[in-house]
Image (tube, rainbow, N blue to C red):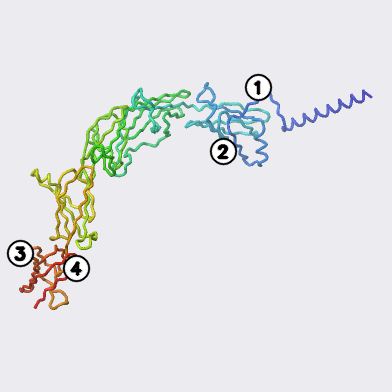
Amino acid sequence: MRLALRKSILAMVFIGCCLLLAVAGSGEGLTFSASPWHGKTEPATQAQHVKSGGNSASEAKEQSQRPPNVIMKAVMARRKSALTSGVSWRVLKSRNRKLVWSGGGGALRIHLKPGRYIVEATYGLAKSTRKIRVRRRRRVKKSISLNAGTIRAKARAVADGPLLKETTFTLYEATRKQTKTQTEPSTRIIPVSAETGKSAHVEKVEIARSTLPSTVFHVPEGDYRLVVRRGMAVSETYVHVKAGRASNVNLVMNTGVLRFSAHAESGDPPISGIQFALYDEKDKLLLSTKRDEPELTLPAGNYRVTAELGFVREERQFTVIAGKNHTEVLVLDAGWLKLSAVSGNDKRPMMHDILYKIFDLSAGASGTIQTPITLAKPSSTIFLKRGKYRVESLYGFHNARLVRDVTISAGDITDVEFEHRGCSLKLKLVTKPGASPVEKVKWTLKYASGGTVLISQDAVPDLILQEGRYQAVAQHDAKTYSRTFEAVANREQTIELIAE
């Protein structure tokens, strides 16, 4: 009985071994290999995304859950340590370059079906590929050399100063000749267009850009030009990158910070709307702006700034020192003159036919020939230097004229209102009241007390006159006609002369 039981157990064990060997031989289930990596369990170091590549979703899921049979590492150069993070991987079929898998992290650990593939590794701006062949029951373990190095860049205003913030590092390709002959960093200024407010400086196509104070570029071995910008200052240097090595670049920009503002009077807040202009020591325009309080980063040196508003202009020369903050306050010593005109009867604002002329009395007293400031808007505000001025307000273009002397104080608004008592009228020569006007008439308009106001050959003169008594004289066909009339303030009148 015991012998029969023992024989049955042995038979069952033999059958189980046969089944196990059959499964192994079919390629399903566990795989056995003489590879020295067999038996090691390595956790994944990146988020992996498997694309089916034509397989069903269940097959792709099953494939992603299998132990990796392809393990690849990326190195910056031969005999260098493997990168542990930041690598982007892509796996493509060798035959049609169809994407099979993509992901990122450190080493590549995936399970692939037998076949030929292209593995692509990207790290920063460096990129490399390698062809592999996957066989049944074997692992592929290889490395990819990126043949790349690293540029670590920092910028300071002065050698022992803190890292500059709000900087932009831009990387360009360079030639070996440039790298050898221009190893010393140089700083210059970028002029800004007064029309567009943008830099007129044009660079070649860039490779990469970063705004981090401490910037890192991973790039293929080669020669590069590194440019750092802060404000209007730009500094550049040339770098030769060797595979597997880091090139540390510490750019000293030799720059300072300039802040400037304009004030009507010392102690007043800054004025808005000022037109600032910045010039270098060779009097070249660098910047034109209407920002209230511009702040600029400039290379150390001598500069000139001007501030203009209305008919007031102030300028200042100064020196920017590397690593220092410099503030320029321009006091314009000026105020505002606000002009308006109303009708003398009902105080209504006058919206047309108003002209102002402003004369600087202090300039006239010095004996200089003065050109008046002319304003054509009925309501006007102008910024003027502190002092005494004479203001004329003309209603129309003849004798409706008012004059006022004013004193402008720095930082103050002087409000001047003119009350005009003018009359709008037309002159006509007619054969009878209400008839069409006679043409080819020479008109002379005089004050009733004497003095000529106007001479015109218009058939119907259209005038604006100060209120008062006038005499109109019309000459036609060797005959003269005249009429004395009263111009009434703020009324429209038609004066007819009858040609008998």
Name the residue rendered at 18%, 43% in the picture.
386
Q: Amino acid at mark 4?
A: Glu
Q: Quadrant of residue 73?
A: top right
The mark found on residue 36 in the picture is 1
Q: How would you rate the neighbour count of disc 3 (Cα within 10 Å): few for under 14, some for 14-19, many for 20 or more?
A: few
Q: Secondary structure at mark 3?
A: loop
Q: Does residue 285 lie above or below 499 as drawn?
A: above
Q: Which residue is mark 3?
A: 450
Q: Nearer the viewer, mark 3 or mark 1?
A: 3
Q: Are marks 4 and 2 in contact (CB under 8 Å)?
A: no
Residue highlighted by disc 4 = 492
> Are the residues at dot 4 and dot 1 in contact (C-beta closer than 8 Å)?
no
Q: Gap in Å between the C-alphas at discs 4 and 2? A: 90 Å
Q: Position of residue 336 (x, y in %)?
A: 22, 47
Q: Residue 142: give its label.
A: none
Query: Is residue 410 toward the left or the right of residue 441 in the image?
Result: right
Residue at the image position 66 percent from the left and 38 percent from the top: 61
Mark 4 nearby-residue class (10 Å; few <14, some 14–19, many ≥20): some
Q: Position of residue 384 (x, y in %)?
A: 20, 45
Label 2: which residue? 97
Mark 3 vs 1, N-terminal side = 1
| SS at circle 2 | loop
337 or 218, nearer to the observer: 337
